[in-house]
Image: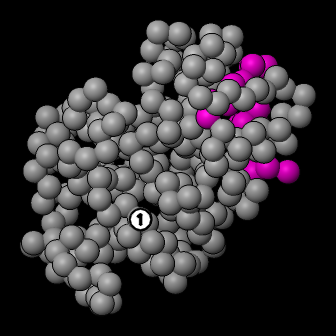
Amino acid sequence: MIYKESDWHILLDGKKILIAGYGREGRSSQTFLSKLLPTANIDVADGNSNIQSAAPHYDLILKSPGIPMSVFADVCPLHKVSSQSDLFLQVYHNQTIGITGTKGKSTTTELINHMLVNGLPLSPRQSDQQFTNVIKAGNMGIPLFDIIPQMSESTLVVAELSCHQLENIHCAPHISVLLNLFQEHLDHYPSYRRYKMAKLNIALKQYKNDHCFYCADNPDLTDLISELRKQITSQISPYTATLEPTTIPYSPSLQGLHNRSNAIVAKMVAQ
């Protein structure tokens, strides 16, 4: 039995589904969906031209992170294009901590995971829900669908999320972290602005009772937050490595102001 299986059926029953891209995440999607919906119409297309030919004929398209949204622009309505992260967050949003940024995602994900693993179970004063295990997944190489068989109501997920995994989500993690924004990894976007907006979905798609931490030391990020603050309905907290103390010890591999910043937000999230 899949945890929250009824929610998955509400999302997917009766849909003709195309898996767009057949790398690690595409194969993960096929494995999970085949078990969840053994009689459903689920097909795979790999390569941009094959995807474009197939896309108009499906109700739902699960895009792998390596496939640009531009592939679908002139061939099908974009609201049909979803992803593992989009569907996963629609079902498990309340149990997910998401981390994004141009740099430092993997380090911060590992730090948060380490603190939570060593701090569980959380007391009722720390959380309304009793979490007794934590799983990390996402952009570091563990597809989100792969961890679903391990999940229960007591599972907390720490997810590293890239811009490609965030660009078409309907809801964001319950707790989100925005580390920084720099002009890198722009191969899939027509402008730096579009890249920044994909990242900012981790805050824009949160609900009122959710929480987002962002680094006030990063000018591009603080400017974007200031511009769009009224569109963010969740609680939002800045942090800064230059002003805030931290009691987290440093290892030889975690030196420098940027790692001090990562450690500070990791501690804030864990607390």
Residue with the mark numbered 1: 106
Q: Residue at x 54, y 11 (%)?
A: 76
Q: Nearer the viewer, residue 214 or 19?
A: 19
Query: Within the magenta stretch, is there residue 2?
Result: yes
State the image coordinates of residue 13 (x, y, percent, origin top left): 78, 25
Q: Nearer the viewer, residue 239 or 45?
A: 45
- When asked about the image quadrant of residue 18, the answer is top right
Q: What is the three-letter code of the residue carrying label 1?
A: Ser
What residue is shown at x 48% (from left), y 78% (from top)? 114
What is the crowding at mark 1: few (fewer than 14 residues within 10 Å), some, or many (at least 20)?
Answer: some
Depth order, front residue of 267/186: 186
Q: Percent from the top left, x then y, of residue 170?
A: 48, 32
Magenta stretch holds residue 11: yes
Can residue 62 be seen here? no
On screen, residue 178 versus residue 18, left or right, reads left
Residue 75: x %, y % from top left: 53, 10
Is residue 194 shown to the viewer in this render? yes
Quadrant position of residue 194 = top left
Quarter of the image with the C terminus in it: bottom left
**For the point 19% across and 78% down, which residue is it?**
256
Is residue 222 shown above or below 106? Answer: above
Q: How many marks?
A: 1
Give the residues drawn in magenta, as a range: 1-21
